[in-house]
Every structure is written in structure tokens, then in C-alpha cells.
Image: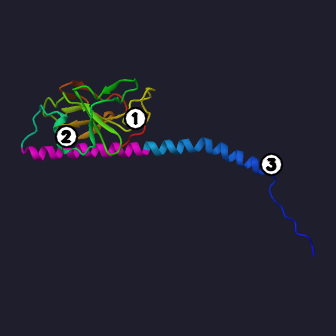
């Protein structure tokens, strides 16, 4: 009976193959996890934007009359679905520096959402008019709900900025209308949206 030759891999070949797979995994796994985190942050931010728009619509319906130009975002609180109101901690701005908002300040409203993120705004700012370019300043959504220390504008710790107009239009900072006005002043499109956010 003829002998059958068994051909296989040597131990050295197996170790080389495992080393190559390890190098590939080292470079691809962090990118996959980062993309997943960015996707989750983007989805949560869109849900927050939808909630804001819906709350403003419900506020207008409940009011039964024209929305006063002096309306602040705190008027929407009964129509927002949130876990708790925060009175401690600092949240990230959307700009590339380390500017942040202090939730213990009486002029800042911070709401912890079910997504784990925080929605916050300056509660002293109002529409200051009823034109289509009148807006209620900035509404921020910080996806991780903590202040970053690295100052990276596109990092997952940085917030996306929304602008709510008197007519109900809601947009992000990068899409702000030229000549937008609130009681805080006039501001035009400037800084971009973070890389993890897109409509």
C-alpha cells in the first residue's frame, strides 16, 4: 500500500500568518470602533434635533396664539423628554478651543437625555423678533455629556450646535442663515459641524 503524503503548514508559517493578522487587527479595529461611536453620536444628535423641533411645535399648539418674540428655550421644557436637569458639570462648546458651559450657572440649562448625551443652552436668550432670520441662539448637544480636555473640535466629546428659528426651522451651525439675529446679537455661518455629525 503506497504511503500518503500529508502536506501542512510549518510552525514558522503559522506564526508569521498570526503576526500579519495581528498587525491588520491593530489598525482596523480602532477605526471600526471609532466609526461605530461616531455613528451612534450622529444618530443621538438627530434624535435630539427632532425632539427640539417637535417640542417647539407642541409649544406653539399649546400656546394657541403667536409665539412671543421674548420666548426663551426654557419654554420648551414641558415638551421635552429628558431624564434629569443637571446643575453640576461642564459641557463642551462646538468650537475648537476648550470653551465650555457650566451647568451650575443660573443662565445655562442642561438636560441629561436618555441617550446619555446632554442638551444645553443659554436660557436668557430669546428670538428678539418674528422674522425668518430670528433665532433662539445656540442649542448644543454633547454626545458623551462630559467636558473634553483635549480641545479637538471634531472629537466625539465636542458638541454639535443647533439653531432654532422663530418659524420652526431647525438647522445646525454650519447651515445658519446669513444675518441670523437673536437677543444675543447677530451671527452668520462660521464654524463647521463636527465630523461625526451630518444630516
Does residue 131 show up magenta in the picture?
no
Q: Nearer the viewer, residue 17 or 168?
A: 17
Report the Cα–Cα distance between label 2 and label 3. Answer: 65 Å
- Residue on which disc 3 sits: 12
- Residue on which disc 2 sits: 77
Q: Residue 68: percent from the left, percent from the top?
A: 9, 35
Among the two numbered marks 2 and 3 on one chain, the one whose residue lies closer to the N terminus: 3
- Which residue sits furthest right? 1
- Residue on which disc 1 sits: 194
**Which of the 4 image quadrants contains residue 9?**
bottom right
Quarter occupied by the C terminus: top left
Report the Cα–Cα distance between label 1 and label 3. Answer: 47 Å
Disc 2 crowd rating (10 Å Cα; few below 14, some 14-19, many 20+) is: some
- Per the picture, the main secondary structure of the magenta-coloured stretch is helix
Disc 3 crowd rating (10 Å Cα; few below 14, some 14-19, many 20+) is: few
Is 103 situated left or right of 60 in this image?
right
Q: Is residue 132 visible?
A: no
Among the two numbered marks 1 and 3 on one chain, the one whose residue lies closer to the N terminus: 3
Number of numbered discs on residues: 3
Q: Secondary structure at mark 2?
A: helix
Does residue 41 show up magenta in the picture?
yes
Q: Residue 36: percent from the left, percent from the top?
A: 47, 46
Q: Secondary structure at mark 1?
A: loop
Q: Looking at the image, which residue is at 70% across and 45% down?
A: 20
Quarter occupied by the N terminus: bottom right
Q: Are marks 1 and 3 in contact (CB under 8 Å)?
A: no
Disc 1 crowd rating (10 Å Cα; few below 14, some 14-19, many 20+) is: many
Q: Secondary structure at mark 3?
A: helix
Amino acid at each position: 500500500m503506497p504511503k500518503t503524503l500529508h502536506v501542512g503548514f510549518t510552525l514558522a508559517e503559522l506564526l508569521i500568518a498570526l503576526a500579519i493578522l495581528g498587525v491588520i487587527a491593530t489598525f482596523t479595529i480602532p477605526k471600526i470602533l471609532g466609526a461605530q461611536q461616531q455613528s451612534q453620536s450622529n444618530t443621538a444628535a438627530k434624535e435630539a434635533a427632532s425632539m427640539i423641533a417637535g417640542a417647539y411645535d407642541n409649544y406653539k399648539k399649546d400656546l394657541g396664539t403667536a409665539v412671543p418674540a421674548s420666548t426663551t428655550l426654557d419654554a420648551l421644557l414641558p415638551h421635552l423628554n429628558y431624564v434629569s436637569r443637571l446643575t453640576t458639570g461642564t459641557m463642551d462648546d462646538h468650537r475648537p478651543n476648550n470653551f465650555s458651559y457650566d451647568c451650575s450657572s443660573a443662565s445655562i440649562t442642561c438636560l441629561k437625555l436618555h441617550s446619555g448625551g446632554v442638551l444645553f443652552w443659554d436660557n436668557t436668550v430669546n428670538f428678539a423678533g418674528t422674522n425668518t432670520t430670528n433665532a433662539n441662539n445656540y442649542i448644543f448637544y454633547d454626545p458623551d455629556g462630559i467636558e473634553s480636555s483635549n480641545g479637538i473640535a471634531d472629537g466625539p466629546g465636542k458638541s454639535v450646535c443647533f439653531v432654532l428659528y422663530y418659524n420652526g426651522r431647525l438647522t445646525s451651525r454650519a447651515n445658519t442663515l446669513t444675518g441670523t439675529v437673536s437677543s444675543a446679537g447677530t451671527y452668520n455661518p462660521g464654524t463647521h459641524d463636527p465630523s461625526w455629525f451630518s444630516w
